[in-house]
Image: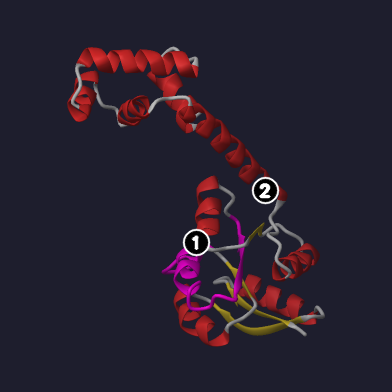
Amino acid sequence: MSITLAIVEDLDEVRDGLKNFISLSSGFKILNTFKTAEEALLELPKLQPDVVIMDINLPGMNGIECIRQVKDKSPGTQFMMFTVYENDEKVFEALKAGASGYLLKNTGLVQLIEALKELHNGGSPMSSNIARKLVTLFRDNQKQTASLEILSNRENETLQLLSRGLLYKEIADQLHISTATVRQHIHHIYEKLHVQNRTEALNKAFGKN
């Protein structure tokens, strides 16, 4: 049985190239292609394709927002991002919105076909450098969690306020404690995180370095 597919891509040559190549590959059936997210939003819930190849940078609404809005109306559909964007923010935003795969447009067409099959079979295919970013993020999050777990609740509250740029007196007012107590909390935070100053503490706790 064929994998049903839709393509959302505003560039004619890319959209037509994908359509023609995938149409020649066995095991796929292209239901429709769309130039805008707005068109896709109207039609995808009616088509209920197995897989949608989605660009991010579209005229009007972007591809990430399109997934966010269409996901509930087409719960059986898997979304494959196919884009030039590889910055962390776009990757994580797309995955959070409901994309299951993320390929860069420099991916070969043969690899794309394999990735579409893998996606349909429950996998989460990604370009290698995108996968590396996720591994790094996961590792950083593990470090961050470990860092914050050794702090008391009050120390965590102090650190959160510190991260907003508040002065010691402002932190004291927020927490209804004395400035001396704030200094004591911050001293303990620095000791526990093995850092010397506010910047190092925030970098270690929130992965800003």
Coordinates of residue 184 in the picture (x, y in percent):
31, 13
Mark 1 crowdedness (10 Å alpha carbons): few <14, some 14-19, many ≥20: some
In this rendering, the answer to whether 179 lies above or below 155 is above
Magenta segment includes 112: no
Q: Secondary structure at mark 2?
A: helix
Residue at x 67% of width, y 48% of height: 131
Question: What's the distance in space between the residues labelled 1 and 2, CA to CA?
Answer: 17 Å
Front-most of 172 and 104?
Answer: 172
Residue that label 2 marks: 131
- Inspect the image, locate mark 1, and give the three-letter code of the amino acid beneath it: Ala
In this rendering, the answer to whether 138 lies above or below 115 is above
Left or right: where does residue 179 sit relative to residue 19?
Answer: left
Figure colour scheme: secondary structure
Magenta segment includes 63: yes
Residue at x 48% of width, y 30% of height: 149
Residue that label 1 marks: 97
Q: Which mark is residue 195?
A: none
Coordinates of residue 188 in the picture (x, y in percent):
39, 15
Left or right: where does residue 91 sit relative to residue 172?
Answer: right
Front-most of 198 and 29?
Answer: 198
Coordinates of residue 194 in the picture (x, y in percent):
50, 15
Residue 75, picture quadrant: bottom right
- Inspect the image, locate mark 2, and give the three-letter code of the amino acid beneath it: Ala
Q: Which residues are magenta?
A: 56-84
Mark 2 crowdedness (10 Å alpha carbons): few <14, some 14-19, many ≥20: some
Front-most of 167 and 54?
Answer: 167
Residue 7, picture quadrant: bottom right
